[in-house]
Amino acid sequence: MTLNQDNPTRLTRKPEEAAPMLGVGRNGVYDLIRSGQLRSIRVGRKILIPLAAIEDFLNGGTK
């Protein structure tokens, strides 16, 4: 079973998917995560960004 990338029920996004939502490049997303400005979840080697974290960041919050 594969998940549709456009599935609106997904609560997380990969850094590549979050980048256009934030108006930055993929490396910019990683910089935001490293600096603590954007919350993320690590699952094994994968980094996922909760939609709530993207919304918080865009609303001016950091956590």
Image (cartoon, rainbow, N blue to C red):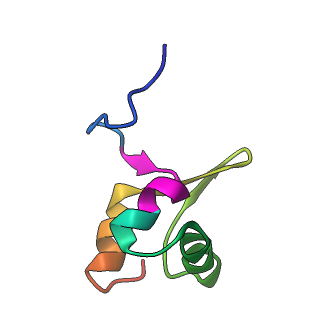
Residue 60 figure quarter: bottom left
In this rendering, the answer to whether 16 lies above or below 5 is below
Position of 58 with respect to 3 (left or right) is: left
Residue 4 figure quarter: top left
Residue 16 within the magenta-colored segment of the rendering: yes
Q: Position of residue 2 (x, y in %)?
A: 48, 20
- Decide which of 11, 7 is in the foreground and name it: 7
Residue that appears at 30% across and 77% down: 58
Residue 57 figure quarter: bottom left
Looking at this rendering, what residue extends furthest in the top direction? 1
Residue 41 within the magenta-colored segment of the rendering: no
Position of 9 with respect to 27 (left or right) is: left
Residue that appears at 52% across and 51% down: 14
- Decide which of 58, 36 is in the foreground and name it: 58
Q: Position of residue 31 (x, y in %)?
A: 61, 79
> Which residues fall within the magenta stretch?
11-18
In this rendering, the answer to whether 6 lies above or below 23 is above
Q: Position of residue 17 (x, y in %)?
A: 45, 54
